[in-house]
Amino acid sequence: MNENSPPDVGVFRRFLREHVAPYWLLQAEIVICVGVQVALEIADPLILRAIIDRALGDGDMELLAWLVGLLLGTLLFRVAFRIVSAWLYSYGGLRVLFDFRRRAYERVQSLSPYFLRGERCGDMLARLTSDVDVLQRAAVYTVVQGLQHVLVILGVGCVLVVLDARLAGILALVYPALVLALWMLNRNLRRESDASRTAIGALYDFLQERLNSVRLIQEFRRERAQAKRFVRVSRPWMRSNLRLSVFSSLQMSLADVMLAIAPITVFFFGGARVLDGSLSVGTLVAFYTLAARLHRPVSLLIDINIELQTARSALRRVYQVIDLEPWIRELPDASAPPRIEGALEFERVDFRWDTTPILHQVCARIAPGERIAIVGASGSGKSTLAALAARFLDPSSGVVRIDGVDVRRWKIADLRRAVGVVPQEAQLFHDTLRENLRLAAPRASDAELSEALEAMQLGPFLAALPEGLDTQVGEAGLRLSGGERQRLALARAVLAEPRVLILDEATSALDPRTERCVLDALVQRHRGRTMVMIAHRLTSIQDCDRILVMSEGRLIESGTHAQLHAARGVYRELYDEQGRRES
């Protein structure tokens, strides 16, 4: 994502169009409630005027009692509508933000894991949490309260004009200067709001990375250095928020000074007119009471303006996530063969990271049910082939086929169901063994889960756990050993039963004896299905039907272990070198 992308001036309009407009009926109910509440607030001074000029002026006790009762009823109704309005706009705001957050999360879920590897995960987390929280405050409170305050200002302004147009004109002279000052300060608010949201993303990224690397930090005794680094990373956030506070205070101070002038002006000119008899005392009291009520909504609108500048920055950052273009897209007419056999084919496949070539004209055909090994030095392109087969990546040129159909023409869900990839780093959720296994088979019984674990040599491990399948595996499975995590990931593959199973160094943490038992069990369970094993430990793949040898992104050798060993090529060099290291 480009942090320096230009701000979208229509970002609020887009948000209203895409996320608020679908709830138009709820928004209409909110507007009606707010409108009634505002009307009731404006009614108080008018009733007060009638009490002073008519009931008290004429000595009418009956009218006084009736007007006081009306004033009390207005107060009660205003409180009731305020409660109803608060519930409506809280529910409406939360509903809108729930949909917005869900849309952003779904977009992240659709992105290739290889794209996410190049992103700052902490910053992405900040966009989905902290930035949306800022929007939540704006959506739940700020927008509706802003509407309420605007309606109060408009309603009070109209009543003031009706009460006395001359005084209203004098009062109005204060506000253009205030609007101009706020407009000039908004540019600074926007700049510092952008800086603050970017800084909080960097802080989230730092914390997320360091929390995942506590052992590394402790191992090299870098606690103090990392604490100092935390202070340096926090400083931009502190500076931008300090500047935001200064500009916000400046806006409020200007507003307070200008708004304080308004009632003084009203009393001076209005008092003179009362003395010359052209204005009644009741009208002056009503006018002053209403004019004083403008102070609060205007002040709160300035607060809302500050909130909206921050919300605008947050909204733009979340839309940057929503607008990300997925690398992997499903064609509208995508489908899957009615019967999946498991043939895998690479035809003249090239792949590049930006301008860096990774694969060069790779051609290979793997028959259904064949057991293939792919070997080669680190960085030779083995894992990239696995990613292309499951379509986590698309080739730069060439075609990858399953059962003769280009994987780009498959429905992605059907393809991932047909092709299972078990990586070297087993990924587990902070949940129970049961739930981690049921990612592959949601309806599997406990007996089936236990059977899969038994097949992967985890039967004694499961039996020793007091909580059994309810045992929590910890964050990223860190309560388990590396070998236990890998075997748990392999048990998931057993439960998923893909037609093409790709093991990408999936047994690297196992000792040779356990690895042999696990692989034998996998071969037995997946008999008749295609299996591709990517391995560095060459002793584990000697009995494969074929071995493909990769070097610098090219497929350079193919054959059985005996054939490749006798050929004295790259495979023989790798095999002999590994034998010398192990001897």
Image: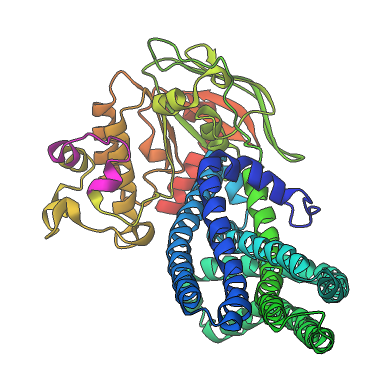
- The x, y position of residue 402, in whole percent, is 49, 17
| Horizontal relation, residue 178 to residue 524: left or right | right
Q: Position of residue 439 (x, y in %)?
A: 32, 40
| Left or right: 409 in relation to 448 | right
Q: Residue at x 44, y 11 (%)?
A: 337
* 318 vs 224: above or below: above
* Residue at the (46%, 71%) spot, across then down: 66
* In magenta segment, residue 442: yes
Point 31% across, 31% down: residue: 496
Within the magenta stretch, is there residue 437? yes
Looking at this view, is 409 or 259 the one in front?
Answer: 259
Number of numbered discs present? 0
Give above or below for 447 relative to 207: above
Q: In this picture, which residue range is highlighted in magenta?
A: 434-449
* Residue 116, placed above or below residue 494: below
Residue 353 visible in the picture? yes
Q: Looking at the image, can residue 130 be seen?
A: no
Between 551 and 29, the one lying in front of the other is: 29
**Residue in front for this viewpoint, 442 or 496:** 442
User: In the rendered image, which quarter is residue 292 located in?
Assistant: bottom right
Q: Please state the horizontal and vertical placement of residue 191, each as a whole percent of the image.
A: 79, 68
The answer to whether residue 163 is left or right of residue 94 is: right
Give the colour scheme shown: rainbow
> Is 577 located above or below residue 562 in the figure?
below
Residue 499 location (% of width, % of height): 36, 22
Residues 559 and 400: in front is 400
